[in-house]
């Protein structure tokens, strides 16, 4: 058989399969109508296992895994179609709608907490995000969460992810513990400088004070300057403050250019990060949900049952809904060894009924599900 003949055969088979697909989906619609009338839920795991067992038995062993995978997808599509008919007023969907309806407005002249001291990247992000904000400083990231919990500030600004060094794991874990809402996000271009005391030169430097995630972003520079040892501190601007206090020509800080003027230091090297587009995403967290009219991003936190394909099936539901995932992060679940908490960001808005419904369904189905916010994030 030549290529054209084989493809003609495939075309003929596809024609029959499309017709069968349509017939199957129509049968699914009948199931959905029945379920709606009888108050039944969409997902029936026992029925799905029976369908998959039958498929596996009916196909040649060499194709069994392929066939099972195809039927798993078919059943996901079936459930998406069913959900367009039922479950639209389940408790989860109602909860999501209530959240959206009760979302508050931004606080004027807010009190904004950031970690570090003046000149920290979080400080620069906070000034962009809240130009009229009253900014105060905390020692650790956790302290920003405590300040918010205790009502000492209205918003907290935190880094969640750098374009080259990746996620800020500690902040993700704190998000799980405190479950505040994300009300804004801002991708801050980050250009690192090496600052030393007045009169120092790059050759004098033996120690660089900085936060490890910033050091990682300048790995190439420090490979070329192997004699410079890293001294980890909690924040880049705290590093600048310490170097200024030490007054030692062998010590430098890796931080923003703004710190030079703030702490009376000299710029010994600038823009030493790996990539010219280096950028850190900052979020603003709040005790209260706010959804601005231009909200374009949604963040979620959830756990999944530890069974084959559960993440794949969940993500497929976003794909079927035409939703573009922008970030997925997994962190250890402290309640269950070697199981994970998933964090998902995607472009979307709760104003889209199908999105609100998808999230409501997940709320109903998953043991742990938290809606973290629907906020505006400008393009990086
Ligand atoms: C169509 C149904 O709903 C869902 C989809 C199934 C399918 O596509 O075969 C099977 C079980 C349910 O999870 C059904 O309950 O039969």
Image (cartoon, rainbow, N blue to C red):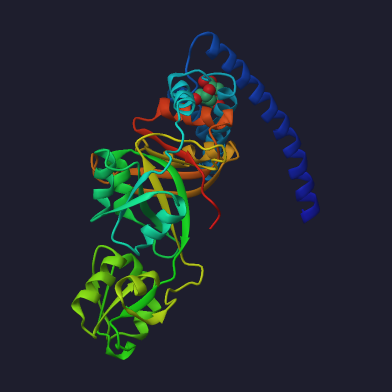
Locate residue 305: give its quadrant. Answer: top left
Count of number-bearing discs: 0
- Foreground residue among 234 and 352: 234
Location of residue 341 in the rendering, given as x and y in whole percent from the top left corner: 34, 43
Location of residue 262 in the rendering, given as x and y in whole percent from the top left corner: 33, 70
- Foreground residue among 180 and 106: 106
Residue at image point 38% right, 30% down: 366
Residue at image point 28% right, 63% down: 235
Locate residue 193: give its quadrant. Answer: bottom left
- Foreground residue among 108 and 331: 108
Location of residue 123 in the rendering, given as x and y in whole percent from the top left corner: 37, 58
Give the vertical position of 146 relative to 270 (above or below): above
Residue most extreme to the bottom: 203
Residue at image point 28% right, 48% down: 144
Location of residue 307 in the rendering, given as x and y in whole percent from the top left corner: 37, 37
Residue most extreme to the left: 246
Give the vertical position of 259 relative to 334 (above or below): below
Residue 28 located left or right of residue 330: right
Residue 153 visible here: yes
- Foreground residue among 242 and 166: 242
Residue 371 located left or right of residue 35: left
Residue 49 visible here: no
């Amino acid at each position: 058989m030549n290529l054209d003949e084989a493809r003609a055969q495939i075309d003929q088979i596809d024609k029959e399969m499309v017709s069968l697909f349509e017939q199957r989906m129509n049968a699914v619609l009948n199931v959905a109508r029945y379920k709606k009338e009888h108050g039944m839920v969409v997902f029936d795991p026992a029925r799905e296992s029976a369908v998959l067992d039958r498929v596996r038995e009916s196909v040649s062993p060499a194709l069994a895994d392929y066939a099972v995978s195809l039927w798993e997808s078919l059943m996901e599509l079936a459930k998406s179609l069913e959900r367009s008919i039922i479950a639209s007023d389940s408790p989860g969907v109602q909860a999501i709608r209530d959240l959206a309806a009760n979302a508050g407005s931004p606080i004027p002249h807010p009190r904004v907490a950031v970690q570090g001291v003046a000149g920290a990247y979080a400080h620069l992000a906070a000034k962009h995000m809240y130009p009229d904000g009253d900014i105060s400083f905390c020692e650790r990231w956790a302290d920003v969460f405590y300040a918010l919990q205790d009502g000492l500030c209205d918003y907290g600004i935190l880094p969640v992810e750098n374009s080259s060094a990746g996620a800020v794991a500690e902040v993700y874990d704190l998000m799980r513990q405190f479950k505040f809402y994300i009300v804004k996000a801002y991708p801050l271009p980050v250009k690192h400088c090496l600052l030393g005391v007045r009169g120092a030169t790059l050759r004098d430097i033996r120690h660089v004070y900085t936060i490890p995630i910033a050091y990682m972003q300048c790995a190439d520079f420090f490979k070329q300057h192997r004699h410079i040892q890293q001294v980890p501190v909690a924040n880049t601007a705290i590093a600048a403050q310490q170097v200024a206090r030490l007054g030692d020509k062998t010590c430098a800080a890796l931080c923003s250019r703004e710190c030079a003027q703030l702490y009376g230091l000299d710029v010994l090297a600038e823009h030493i990060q790996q990539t010219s587009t280096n950028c850190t995403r900052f979020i603003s967290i709040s005790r209260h949900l706010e959804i601005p009219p231009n909200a374009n991003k949604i963040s979620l936190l959830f756990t999944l049952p530890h069974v084959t394909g559960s993440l794949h099936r969940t993500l497929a539901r976003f794909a079927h809904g035409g939703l573009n995932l922008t970030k997925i992060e997994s962190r250890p679940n402290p309640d269950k060894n070697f199981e994970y908490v998933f964090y998902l960001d995607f472009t979307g808005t709760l104003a889209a009924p199908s999105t609100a419904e998808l999230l409501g369904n997940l709320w109903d189905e998953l043991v742990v599900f938290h809606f973290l916010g629907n906020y505006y994030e400008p393009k990086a």
